[in-house]
Structures are given as C-alpha cells and as structure tokens.
Image (cartoon, helix red, strand yellow):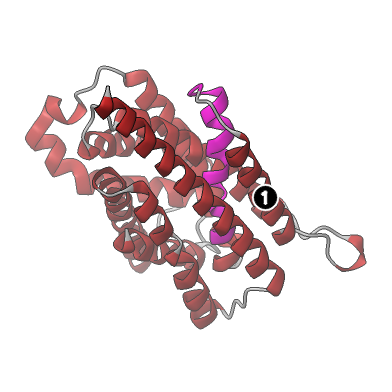
Amino acid sequence: MVASALGFTVMTTLIKYLGDDYPAALQTFYRQVAGFIVLLPVILQRRRAAFATTRPGILIFRASAGTLGMILSFYAFQKMPLADANALSFTRTLWLVPLAAFVVRETVGPMRIGAALVGFVGVLVMIRPGAGGEFAVGLPALAMLAASFLFALTITGMKVMTRDHSPMVLLVWSATLGLVFALPGALFVWRWPAPMDLALLSAMGVVGTITQGCYIKGMSIGDAAAMAPIDYIRLVFAAVIGFALFNDVPGVWTLVGAAIVVASTLFITWREHRQAQAAKRLGDEA
C-alpha cells in the first residue's frame, strides 16, 4: 500500500508535467498502452486463463467506468494543485456508502450515513465560496468528484470480483478493455509524442499499472481497516512534490477540508471492519 501511494504520486506528477502538451484523453490512452504491454507476457503465457471469468459483464462495466474516471482524473490533476486534486480523490470512499445501499443492497446504518455527510461537508470546505462571492469550485474539481464516483463504482465491482477472481485476472481485463475504451477519445486529440515525451508517457503507464497491482494486492491480503489509512500517505507525498516541482502550496481551507474527508473516510472504514468482524464471529458460532 505504501508502494501504491508512492507510485500514484509519481504517476500524477508525470500527468501534470506532461499536461500542457498532451490532453487527458491522450495521456489515458498512452497509459493504457504501456500497462497492456507490461501485462502482455502474462497474457501470452496464460492465454485463456488470463481472461478466465464467469462474469464478463461486470468486468466490462468496471473497465468502462474506470477509463472514463481516469480521463476525468487526469484532467483534474493537470489543472489543479496535486494536493488539492488528491484530497478530492479521497471522496471515492464517501461515494461507496450510497453505492452500498443502492447497488449492493447493503444495510447502511445512521453512523455510516452521518460519516459520509460529514465527509461531503469537508468537500464543501475545500471548494468553499471565495472572495467576492465566487465559488472556488470549477470544472477540474467537478471532474475529480465525478472521477471519484466512477472509481467507487469500480471498487464496488472489485469487492465482488475478488471473491472468486485473482488480482492478475482483474488487471488483465482492466488493461485490455481500458486500451480499447481509451482509443476513441485519443483519436480526437491525437499527436505523436517526441522521444523524451514517449519515454515519460511509457513510464507513467508502467508506474500506473504497478500502482494498481500493489493496491489490489494490498487490499486483498491485508486487513482493510489497516490498509486504507496507509493510502492517505499520498496526500503528504503530493504536497511535498507539488511544492518542490510546481510551487504549489495547499491552502488552509484545503487542509481543513482534507482533514475532515480523511477522518470521515477512516471512520467509515473502521465501522465496516467492525461489522465484518461481528458477522464473522456470528458465522463461526453458528
């Protein structure tokens, strides 16, 4: 999970650095190409086993939602300070609460609902009305909120699929379909990269694939309540790198709002962990 947080920060740094010359849709395509190439040896070795599934519909939905979410998040990382964009990206945990109720049909108690509402108050703090009555919120912030919702959909699907699918199968499907779904958007803004840019775009794709693999592996073998807080280390990484490379300084309201969002999402994770433990104990006793 620490490797995932660091890799994610490196990837978003490259996204921002290349953003002036390569639109988000094109960056997404190159990232998916590099990720597919990384997994190609596994695909060639395992062949049909690499795509073994009984529920292709969920995998197709995850890939389409993930690709669109990636384009929107890349746009936000290009246009916003890294720390601000990372702070808003944490709202994906908050979106999981209504998704659990309406999609997975879980029973969501008042504590989880209250924590989610508090978390969204933190979002409002970050995108507060600014001086002169103008809202700080803009298209990049809205894009990141929409991306977080789409990523929450993919996480919901991942929770279902990891019960009987290996992390590698999920990665192979995500990389393959992601490449297919990213191509149409890239064609509208196509340009051939310079050699150095191609190297950086390839590095972004490789790091992004490793990051995704580390995250899936960490969540699958570790305790969710212990793993989730580690992911917030990337907020620190993003603030340091953003200041060092782009002279981005997180504002006070961004830090306050981020603290509220992180606290509420940690509470939700802890609450879900306690409920899972209680359900397991009841199952063992039965």
- Secondary structure mostly seen in the magenta stretch: helix
Question: Residue 160 location, x and y as percent?
Answer: 35, 28
Count of numbered marks: 1
> Which of 6/280 is in front?
280
What residue is drawn where x is 35% and y is 39%? 277
What residue is drawn where x is 49% and y is 78%? 240
In the rendered view of the protein, which quadrant contains the N terminus?
bottom left
Q: Is residue 229 above or below residue 57?
A: below
What residue is drawn where x is 73% and y is 59%? 125
For disc 1, the neighbor class at 10 Å (few under 14, some 14 to 19, many from 20) is: some
What residue is drawn where x is 36% and y is 33%? 159
As for residue 98 lying within the magenta part, the answer is yes
Is residue 230 in view?
A: yes
Question: Residue 66 location, x and y as percent?
Answer: 45, 38
Residue annotated with mark 1: 118
- Residue 71 horizontal side relative to residue 88, left or right: left
Span of residues in magenta: 86-105
Residue 58, quarter of the rendered image? top left
Q: Residue furthest front?
A: 285
- Residue 233 horizontal side relative to residue 95, left or right: left
- Residue 44 horizontal side relative to residue 161, left or right: left
Q: Residue furthest left?
A: 45
Question: Residue 4 location, x and y as percent?
Answer: 33, 58
In the rendered view of the protein, which quadrant contains the C terminus?
top left
**Mark 1 belongs to which amino acid?**
Val
Residue 250, quarter of the rendered image? bottom right
Question: Residue 213 location, x and y as percent?
Answer: 27, 49
Q: Is residue 187 above or below residue 84?
A: above
As for residue 253 lying within the magenta part, the answer is no
Disc 1 secondary structure class? helix
